[in-house]
Image: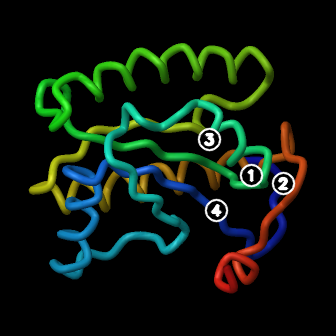
Amino acid sequence: MKNVEKGWEPRILAFLCNWCSYAGADLTGISRIQYPPNVRIVRVPCSGRVNPYYIIKALQCGWDGVLVSGCHPGDCHYISGNLVARRRFAVLKDLLEYVGIEPARVNFSWVSAAEGGKFASVVTEVVNEVKALGPAKRLVKVRIEWKNLKNR
């Protein structure tokens, strides 16, 4: 584990598919399943609609990690959106690794609406992986603080 300042917690930005992963996150809350509060959620129509630029921009703005989650392959409400996302993000991870971003900072998962427990475990795993890496330093241009997000 890298030398990390005491009390530091990673900040994770999560892009969740409206139909499956966001509903899974909602089920997690309804079921009162605990998971780390380090994640901020952006609801998108489909994981296939997440532009790789959004992920790069999130890392530039100081987010320590990014999670993109959608419907399981074959169960997409838009037929093949999650398959497009899977291909797009495989290329993006290779690109980010090439420029020196740790692969564990960008994560992709498939969570259905009935998998509240799985959503909690995915978020916990992502937070633990990013915490082990320490704060993001590469590619960061502006660091947005939590308190500034609340006022927007």
Question: Which residue is located at x 51 percent, y 65 percent?
Answer: 39
* Mark 1 → mark 4, Cα distance in angstroms: 11 Å
- In the structure shown, which secondary structural element does the residue marked by tag 4 occupy? loop
The label on residue 134 is: 1
State whether residue 52 is above or below residue 54: above
In front of the other: 59 or 78: 78
Mark in front: 4 vs 3: 3
What residue would you read off at disc 2? 3
* Mark 1 → mark 3, Cα distance in angstroms: 21 Å
User: Hey, what amino acid is under mark 4?
Assistant: Arg
Tell me which numbered mark, 1 or 3, is placed earlier along the sequence.
3
Location of residue 26 by image quarter: bottom left
Q: Is the Cβ of the residue at disc 1 closer than 8 Å to that at disc 4? A: no
Q: Is the Cβ of the residue at disc 1 closer than 8 Å to that at disc 2? A: yes
In front of the other: 81 or 140: 81
User: Hey, what amino acid is under mark 3?
Assistant: Tyr
Mark in front: 1 vs 3: 3
Q: Residues within 10 Å of mark 4 (few under 14, many from 20)?
A: many
- In the structure shown, which secondary structural element does the residue marked by tag 2 occupy? loop
x, y percentage for residue 57? 72, 43
Tell me which numbered mark, 2 or 3, is placed earlier along the sequence.
2
Mark in front: 1 vs 4: 4
User: Hey, what amino acid is under mark 2?
Assistant: Asn
Q: Is residue 25 left or right of residue 79?
A: right
x, y percentage for residue 131? 64, 55
Tell me which numbered mark, 1 or 2, is placed earlier along the sequence.
2
